[in-house]
Amino acid sequence: MNSHVPAASLASNGTGKILVVDDDVINRKLLRDILEACGYQVTLAEDGLQALETALDNPQDVILLDVMMPRMNGYEVCAQLRKDSRTAHLPVLMITALNGRNDRLKGIQAGATDFITKPIDAEDIRLRVKNAVFGKHLYDKVQEDYARLGKLEFLRDNLTQMIVHDIRSPLMVLSGVLDRLALETDNLSQIQRRDIAHGQSSCRELSEMVNSMLDVSRLEAGKMPISRMACDIREIARLAAESLVAMAREKTVALSVTGDPVSADVDKDIIRRVFINLIVNAINFSSPGGPIIIGVSSAGTAVRVTVTDQGSGIPPEYHQRIFEKFGRVASCEENQSYSTGLGLTFCKLAVEAHGGQISVVSEPGKGAVFTFDLPVSITPLPAEPRQPEESCPPLPTPPPPPTPPPRSARILVIDDEKWLRDNLQTILNRCGYSVETAADGREGVEMYKQAMVGGSPFDLVIMDLIIPGGIDGKQAIKELLAIDPDVRAILASGSADAVLMASQAKYGIKGVIVKPYTAKPLLALLDKVLRS
């Protein structure tokens, strides 16, 4: 947006509105004659109270204000103007016969922009008023551009939200088809299985990108539900690093987590994602063989986390930009620029939502140290034996094989999208579940009720939150709870309200999976809920 406007057009004669305030009628008329001769529109006020009333009722560009007046002097009028947001920005030129230093300081303290000394010099008046009008019009132009920019950002964010929302449905279709094909292992060649795996990986990556965009929007709007509890930050760091071992091995990068157990009141899942984003960022910009160290320590009233890499480094001028949405950072080695996407933006907003701060210290060629602080928890962690500092790799000892999941469980799927109902039914049936579907909340509630009456109750319900027509997911879960207080329900939804509902015990939600999702996390969630 080109906001350059020639100075002449901002300060040209005839465009300024001037309020002259003076209890002396001769001075008022003299100032009016001088200013009207320059093309200004002049309004007169004979005392401070009238000046305040006029300034509010008839917006001005500049106020010429006498100091010595009855009822309310110029200092008091100026102070009142500065207290009101409607007039606080107006240039106020004080006209006074007082020329002492203390008088000027008193005027500056009250908020005066400039001073004009009596006796009045016509040329002095013209020049000072011209400059003041220019400043006021420049302020108006900045405000106008700022408002226009705000509208454009609002439209951009709405467009982004609409695109992201519309991407979900075809992405769910594509992901579902790939998941179904992946089940046909006996009929696929090795190349076909590899291609399907690549497609599934791309779907997961795109799903994470979509969800990150939505999470960033929710964090910016202050609508991201945060479930705080006392957590061991070092343990969250260890689990995050552990999940990225394979990625680190591909880059031949060594991950290590250092420090002692330290407790902070955080949303465990959100802070884990902060760790993952920072570690992934470090892996991407590290040289092969370079170490990445995740440090956790106590820093007084805060828990301090550092993620240190030996990568190419970040020039100082980009230290703030990298935390902006899709900020671009120059590469020192390849003379190119790369988008930082939304990962670091999410980190910044998530840490700040927890009352913390995040920053980076880096120089080109010397790696980077990302640091964030979180308020320390007042709840102490349970005592545990001191464990050695963990390094990743090596991989952790594999857990014992889990107990076979209850695949014979009866599941009810409630969703208005027919392709999604059919796809879930196919996948879950192939996994050994018995699945029935309903197209809306009312039908789902009736099916659940009939199943209980018939002696074959559903073990679990998977339902969307936003269901057009009939009753929505929120009302449906209330009615299901009335029928069966022990109902187990999973919300599969793209709505932020789903996460909020899941955090409230009164709804009885056992889990949430955010659209778009793939079969693997859904099956893991089903297994977890059915075992509980």
Image (cartoon, helix red, strand yellow):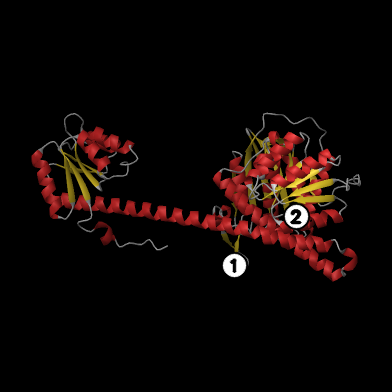
Residue 125 shows up from this direction: yes
Return the x and y of residue 341 as percentages of the image width and height: 61, 58
Occupied quadrant, residue 354: top right
The residue to which callout 2 is attached is 421
Q: Is residue 348 left or right of residue 392?
A: left
- The residue under label 2 is which amino acid type? Arg
Return the x and y of residue 418 as percentages of the image width and height: 72, 57
Q: Is residue 392 left or right of residue 373?
A: right
Secondary structure under tag 1 reads loop
Return the x and y of residue 393 as percentages of the image width and height: 81, 52
Q: What separation in Å lies between label 1 and label 2 (alpha carbons)? A: 46 Å
Q: Quadrant of the C terminus?
A: top right
The residue to which callout 1 is attached is 336
Q: Comparing marks 1 and 2, which lies closer to the viewer? A: 2
Return the x and y of residue 261 as percentages of the image width and height: 74, 36
Q: Earlier in the sequence, mark 1 or mark 2?
A: 1
- Taking depth in this image into account, of 210 and 162 the one nearest to the observer is 162
Residue at the left extreme of this rendering = 26
Please report the residue visible at 32 percent of the width from the left and 41 percent of the height from the top: 88
- The residue under label 1 is which amino acid type? Gln
